[in-house]
Image: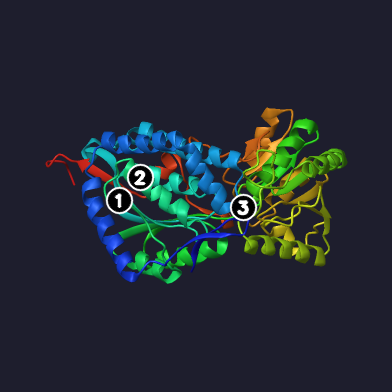
């Protein structure tokens, strides 16, 4: 595996990094375990200081942190700044709330002879985080902020095309006051991951990434009897009901599909529109997508970013060709994208029939699938006709009814009148092939703790 920074817009290889040696892996595990033995005893107040320091540093140095994101994976600079702020907000959330979220829980027992029972939440130990390239900071923050706050220590294996972002976060946590060894970035190889998971000092793995990677890591973790959480792909439904405000809904649709270059697991990938407003939505949507401006992600006029790599661009172009070969219609929209950079022409796929395998794929880029639903019930049916179950949205003027429709959509998150949203104080996660487990809030911080029962019983209690 080659860890390298390749600018997606210029194509220039800016910096490369050697793979970690086996000796470096062993040292990192040993140091993380040693750090855990003291970090788990550190007070919530002291841990909170580190988390708040991290948030403060990110906000103070937002420009250099954001610039690195744009250089490494092509994210619009405006979106990069937003990611830095989101990461800071996550650190701050746990600085303020971790102690309350992990407070001991007193149980109400049925029989006084059961004693005084409480549940405490103890950290497990060293954890491994395997993270993707599309949000290089946010993906790290949303796992390490809660788990470090809980008293665990972390090893990071990041995507090979964002090595400097990974190193920047290790430096961030060191500057924030985290003890040596408590968070370590590793340029690990795929075979070294299994070595890490098999080590008895490592107690779990959190992965965000593709279905394929998730299946491999989940199997390795299961074989080693280690806890895992999987945040995998998505093909979010964007359901438009007959009473939706089409002007506003269409703007959200264009944004929901194309932010971060369309490289978001919770992008609005499947537009499902009831028949009576389908044509009007389609015409507005084409105009909105055509208005996107592809170009240098550092240019404030640019609204459509390049994809993260040439490989990613080639893959999605091939998927479009396959969808068409199975009967779909592909409509390229807008001015031609630049020849420079790893761009994909915004494309709308229609006529994606039930027997077209593309109907069940995740397109990780500026490709939209539009479906005409006969009515509301048919829209819900199409929304649920997916192997994925991450996020989704329902657009309607009747928000109470929208919430009722949202209850019928089988995903981990559904929003009414907004594409799937990512915030520090909202939980994140899905079902089916979108993975299992949750990140953020109390759900996330409790994924890798021992929910231990302590029961004080009268020694003279009856058997």
Left or right of 423? Residue 253 is right
Label 3: element kind: loop
Circle 3 residues within 10 Å: few <14, some 14–19, many ≥20: many
User: Residue 226 placed where, x, y %?
Assistant: 37, 61
> Mark 3, mark 1: which one is toward the viewer?
1
The residue nearer to you, when weighing 220 against 168, is 168
Residue under the image location 52 percent in, 64 percent down: 213
Question: Do tag 1 and tag 2 residues touch (Cβ < 8 Å)?
Answer: yes
Q: Which residue is mark 3?
A: 234
Q: Which residue is mark 1?
A: 182
> Mark 3, mark 2: which one is toward the viewer?
2
As drawn, which residue projects farthest toward the left?
Answer: 460
User: Residue 149 placed where, x, y %?
Assistant: 34, 41
Label 2: element kind: helix
The residue nearer to you, when weighing 273 against 380, is 273
**Which is nearer the N-term, disc 3 or disc 1?**
1
| Distance of label 3 from label 1 (alpha carbons) | 32 Å
Residue under the image location 71 percent in, 51 percent down: 366
User: Residue 445 placed where, x, y %?
Assistant: 39, 43
- What number is the disc on residue 320? none
**Residue 106 seen in render:** no
The residue nearer to you, when weighing 218 against 342, is 342
**Which is nearer the N-term, disc 1 or disc 2?**
2
Label 1: element kind: loop
Q: Which residue is mark 2?
A: 173
């Amino acid at each position: 595996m080659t860890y390298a920074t390749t600018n997606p817009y210029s194509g220039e290889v800016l910096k490369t990094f050697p793979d970690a040696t086996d000796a470096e892996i062993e040292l990192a595990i040993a140091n993380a375990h040693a750090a855990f033995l003291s970090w788990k005893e550190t007070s919530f107040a002291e841990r909170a200081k580190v988390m708040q320091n991290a948030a403060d540093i990110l906000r103070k140095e937002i420009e250099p942190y954001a610039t690195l994101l744009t250089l490494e994976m092509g994210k619009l600079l405006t979106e990069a700044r937003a990611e830095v702020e989101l990461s800071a907000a996550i650190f701050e959330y746990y600085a303020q709330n971790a102690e309350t979220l992990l407070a001991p829980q007193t149980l109400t027992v049925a029989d006084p002879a059961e004693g005084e029972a409480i549940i405490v939440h103890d950290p497990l130990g060293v954890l491994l985080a395997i993270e993707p390239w599309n949000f290089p900071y946010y993906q790290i923050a949303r796992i390490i902020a809660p788990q470090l706050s809980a008293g665990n220590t972390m090893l990071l294996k990041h995507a090979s095309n964002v090595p400097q972002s990974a190193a920047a976060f290790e430096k961030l946590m060191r500057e924030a006051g985290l003890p040596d060894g408590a968070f370590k970035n590793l340029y690990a190889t795929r075979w070294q991951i299994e070595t890490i998971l098999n080590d008895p000092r490592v107690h779990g793995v959190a992965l965000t990434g593709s279905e394929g990677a998730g299946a491999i890591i989940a199997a390795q973790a299961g074989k080693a009897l280690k806890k895992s959480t999987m945040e995998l792909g998505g093909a979010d439904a964007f359901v438009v009901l007959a009473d939706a405000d089409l002007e506003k809904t269409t703007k959200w649709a264009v944004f929901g599909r194309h932010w971060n270059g369309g490289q978001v697991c919770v992008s609005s990938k499947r537009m499902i529109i009831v028949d009576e407003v389908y044509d009007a939505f389609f015409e507005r949507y084409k105009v909105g997508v055509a208005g996107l401006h592809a170009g240098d992600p550092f240019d404030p006029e640019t609204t459509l970013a390049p994809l993260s790599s040439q490989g990613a661009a080639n893959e999605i172009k091939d998927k479009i060709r396959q969808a068409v070969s199975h009967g779909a219609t592909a409509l390229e929209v807008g001015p031609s994208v630049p020849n420079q950079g790893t761009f994909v022409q915004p494309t709308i796929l229609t006529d994606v029939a039930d027997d077209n395998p593309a109907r069940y794929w995740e397109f990780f880029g500026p490709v939209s699938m539009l479906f005409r639903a006969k009515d509301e019930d048919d829209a819900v049916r199409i929304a649920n006709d997916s192997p994925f179950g991450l996020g989704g949205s329902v657009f309607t003027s009747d928000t109470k009814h929208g919430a009722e429709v949202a209850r019928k959509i089988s995903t981990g998150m559904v929003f009414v009148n907004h594409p799937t949203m990512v915030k520090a104080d909202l939980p994140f996660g899905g079902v089916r092939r979108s993975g299992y487990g949750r990140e953020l809030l109390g759900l996330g911080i409790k994924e890798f703790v021992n929910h231990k029962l302590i029961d004080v019983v009268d020694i003279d209690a009856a058997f």
